[in-house]
Amino acid sequence: MTDTRSRARGQAPTPARAGASTPPTARPARTERHHAGAILAGTVLLVAVFVLSLSVGTTALPLSDVLASLLGGSGGPADFVVRELRLPRAVAGICVGAALAVAGALTQTVTRNPLASPDIIGVTSGASLGAVAVIVFGGSAGGASGAVASVGVPAAAMAGGAIASLLVALVARAGERVVLVGVGVTAMCQSAVTWLLVSGDVTDAGRAATWLAGSLSGRVWTDVAPVVVAIVALTPATWLLTRELAVLVLGDDVATGLGANPSRTRWVALGASTVLAGLATAAAGPVAFVGLCAPALAVRIARVERPPLVLSALVGAVLVSGSDLVARNLFGWLGLGPTELPVGIVTGIIGAVYLVVLLHRRAGRST
Amino acid sequence: MQGKPHLTRPLLLGSGLLVLAVLASLAFGAEALSAQQVWHALVAPSGTDADVIVRDLRLPRTELGLLVGASLGVAGALMQTLTRNPLAEPGLFGVSAGAALAVVVGIRLGLAGTVASSVWWALLGAVLATALIFVAASRLGRAGLAPVTLAVLGVAVSAGLAAITSAFVLLDTRTLDGYRFWAVGSLSGRGDGVAGQVLPFLAVGAVLTVLAARDLDHFVLGDDLARGLGVSLTRLRLLGVVAIGVLTAAGVAACGPIAFVGLLTAHAGRVLVGSRHLLLLPLCALLGASALLLADVAGRLVTGNGELQAGVVLGLVGGPLFVALIARRRIAL
């Protein structure tokens, strides 16, 4: 034991600061232009995925019909498919992706740890525990419905996420510790969730399991509304934080010297991140890995040191809507019938592969 | 070198704990039995209610807990040594998730209905997942030794495998219903003779572990020293991967993915005997079996009517302990 421990302590201080190891960029102006270009490209890509997800499906609609329905309605059957079925789902995908990505970017900046994200530090699993408890206890065999489902599930998810986040923040204190404490909290919440799944009846368990996989299926406008409101409400707040977060990277002493209040910034950012991740989880279930991957990808694309908030949001939105497009239509494309996969399965697989690649790359650099 | 009595004491302690755990597992439950009743049932059964409860319900469950707990304890200790990572644990590092995925694929293909057939699937999945983690860790070089890197790698592998598993499960309600009861990690309702079916696998795992024990002592000293002392690292790692895979697979196939047994027992074991593997591994077997049995008993006692499964108890107790280990700075990050 002693040998192992001293060995572990003797080595380089964890891969936590990957951001710091990105090569310094040539000239600020060039970086700015590159960043703006990336945002533009991201927006174009997002619009493309958005339109595509409105037109592709079991009934394929030509783009002209989609645009007509969006811009006022042609009165045809396409109107219903586009405006009531596909639009809420597409908007939900964009909002959930953006919210998770911004939440991830905030946590990663605050903890200065590129591995910290809502799903790794336990926020998502806390939210899952809350939501599953409501789904299993709230509804009889038919599953939670009415007020219990539309208010109870999001509220419980929020509460669970907030408690988990607070717990991790209080216990961990330091940035590197957050990940491991989060792993512990996640394990705890997961075993409580499996227990809830067993104690409910199979219909409720099925609903809960679908929810747990992270699905955008059957989302209507009332499901989407809270996330949209949260994003709109919190955007100015995160905007205000940008400057303070930039200073935070320099370390607490320098930040204080520059007139910032690091501990307040940290709590505000963590709070915003928890609200965003909690609401996104409430709307779509724990969509895996978006909070981890999207900011990391944004850092890579923009070649900056700290997750850029806007670009992260765009990457997250493209990731989730694109994954949902694939998840929704994969079986149809393969000719296996109309079965839909939950979006979380696609993002989970993408995320796991990406994380292994990320760790591999970083190891290549450090040795 | 410590004196002999000092070294046997932990083993005696572990055995004592295990005896207590076994007795508790036989005596406590919905119907509390006295020590005499348990003794009567074991030695001279005459068909009383107590005899039936002990022999038909509690004894098979206790046997299963003994075997699975011991194997998970040993697998945890092996994994911690071979990854040189104090957080390594089959349940947290994706080995159980690999076994679970393989079993679900087996169920889906209609080839893994019983425990006997699902063990083979679990074995395949567990060995592949262990190998994946090891390869990734060794490719990562120095960074791969950092507890946090490997822990996140484990989380990533687990989550990726779990995503595929849930794709299989969600497409079929019957698979879901079977899967959720299996996945919760319970010693009860596992059918007749399960303990007998997993026993051969555990025996193989135990033999492999004993073969590796001496080399493991050298391995702890570092790759270069170990090589200098005549240890073939490739052989040892291969042996370790297969042993961890076999031990975890048998446990997972029989009881579902149970986390934290390996982590907790390996830490307790190291506190008691350090890293002498010929002592540590048997001690971990004793402690692992005790931990699982006690968790099972606690689950029976805590809830009045329904039971709290052993896997859930271990998750709820193990999670905070894991967090405490980190918060207490017992683990260098």
Image (spheres, coloured by chain):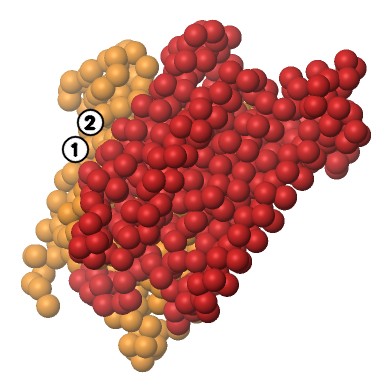
Q: Position of residue A340 (x, y in %)?
A: 74, 32
Please tell me the colour of chain B.
Answer: orange
Residue B89 in view, yes or no: no
Q: In this view of the protein, which residue sits in the foreground, A145 or A238?
A: A238
Q: Residue furthest bottom?
A: B228
Cα–Cα gap, marks 2 and 1: 6 Å
Q: Are marks 2 and 1 on the same chain?
A: yes
Please tell me the colour of chain A.
Answer: red
Side (left or right) of A172 relative to A203: left
* Callout 2 touching callout 1 (CB < 8 Å): yes
The quadrant where residue A225 appears: top right
Side (left or right) of B329 relative to A276: left
* Residue B250 sits above or below residue B50 on the image: below
- Residue sitting at 18 percent across and 44 percent down? B17
Q: In this view of the protein, which residue sits in the foreground, A45 or A293?
A: A45
Residue identifier under label 2: B24
Residue A137 in view, yes or no: yes
Q: In this view of the protein, which residue sits in the foreground, B308 or A103?
A: A103
- Chain at numbered mark 1: B
Q: Position of residue A149 (x, y in %)?
A: 51, 14
Q: In this view of the protein, which residue sits in the foreground, A254 or B72?
A: A254
The C terminus of chain B, quarter of image: bottom left
**Numbered-mark total:** 2
Residue identifier under label 1: B20
Side (left or right) of A4 relative to B163: left
- Residue sitting at 44 percent across and 46 percent down? A239
Badge 1 local density, few (<14 within 10 Å), some, or many (20+)?
some
Q: Position of residue B291 (x, y in %)?
A: 27, 42
Q: Position of residue A191 (x, y in %)?
A: 40, 35
Badge 2 local density, few (<14 within 10 Å), some, or many (20+)?
many
The N terminus of chain B, quarter of image: bottom left
